[in-house]
Amino acid sequence: MVKSNPNISNRQNQILEKLGNCDDELSGQELYRVLHAGESSMGLATVYRNLQVLVKKGLVRSRNLPTGEVLYAPVKRDVHHLTCVDCGITTSLQGCPVKNINLPQSKTKNFQLLFHTLEFFGLCQHCLERQST
Ligand SMILES: [Zn+2]
Ligand SMILES: [Zn+2]
């Protein structure tokens, strides 16, 4: 059982819990479906609105795929991906290559850092072989 955060609404806690229970990132649509499979009757617009609030509070991270889709995950899960620009297949990296990177203090002095994204794009083996034939 995930301890609920008293600083956010019940709906936001529900969203955070579902994201936390999922090993993978979820799009707004997928999250909406997961919530509907349970007891929640949150509308899609409400899901997106609450996701935005959670991102602004630094509890949820978001990343944009080349397809325009946005994926969400709990901010504490610091995972990065290799994405094939052709078929869109995604592989997650073990560990965060920039976890301990130091940003210039002059830049972060008046800026509360919440999360970062780091994306690698390329061609997967399958697409590489297909292109060379
Ligand atoms: Zn590919
Ligand atoms: Zn990272």
Image (cartoon, rainbow, N blue to C red):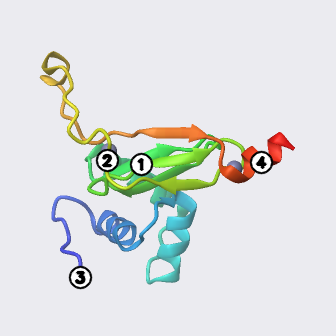
Name the residue: 29% across, 67% down: 13
Which residue is tagged 2? 96
Residue 52 versus residue 33 in the image, above or below: above
- Secondary element at tag 2: loop
Structural crowding at the residue carrying mark 2, measured as other residues with C-alpha within 10 Å and reported as few (<14), some (14–19) or many (≥20): few
Which circle's residue, 1 or 4, is located before the other in the chain?
1
Look at the numbered disc 2 and say if its residue's Cβ is closer than 8 Å to ligand 2.
yes
Name the residue: 33% across, 39% down: 116
Closer to viewer: mark 3 or mark 4: 4
Q: Are marks 2 and 1 in contact (CB under 8 Å)?
A: yes
Indicate left or right for 17 with 23 as reference: left
Which residue is tagged 1? 80
Indicate left or right for 40 with 85 as reference: left
Residue 14 in which image quadrant = bottom left
Between the residue at mark 3 and the residue at mark 2, the CA separation in whole angstroms equals 27 Å
Look at the numbered disc 1 and say if its residue's Cβ is closer than 8 Å to ligand 2.
yes
Indicate left or right for 68 with 52 as reference: right
Q: Nearer the viewer, residue 103 or 33?
A: 103
Structural crowding at the residue carrying mark 4, measured as other residues with C-alpha within 10 Å and reported as few (<14), some (14–19) or many (≥20): few
Closer to viewer: mark 1 or mark 4: 4
- Secondary element at tag 1: loop
Which circle's residue, 4 or 2, is located before the other in the chain?
2
Label disc, if present, on residue 129 of the rendered structure: 4
Name the residue: 23% across, 76% down: 2
Residue 102 in which image quadrant = top left
Which residue is tagged 3? 1
- Secondary element at tag 4: helix
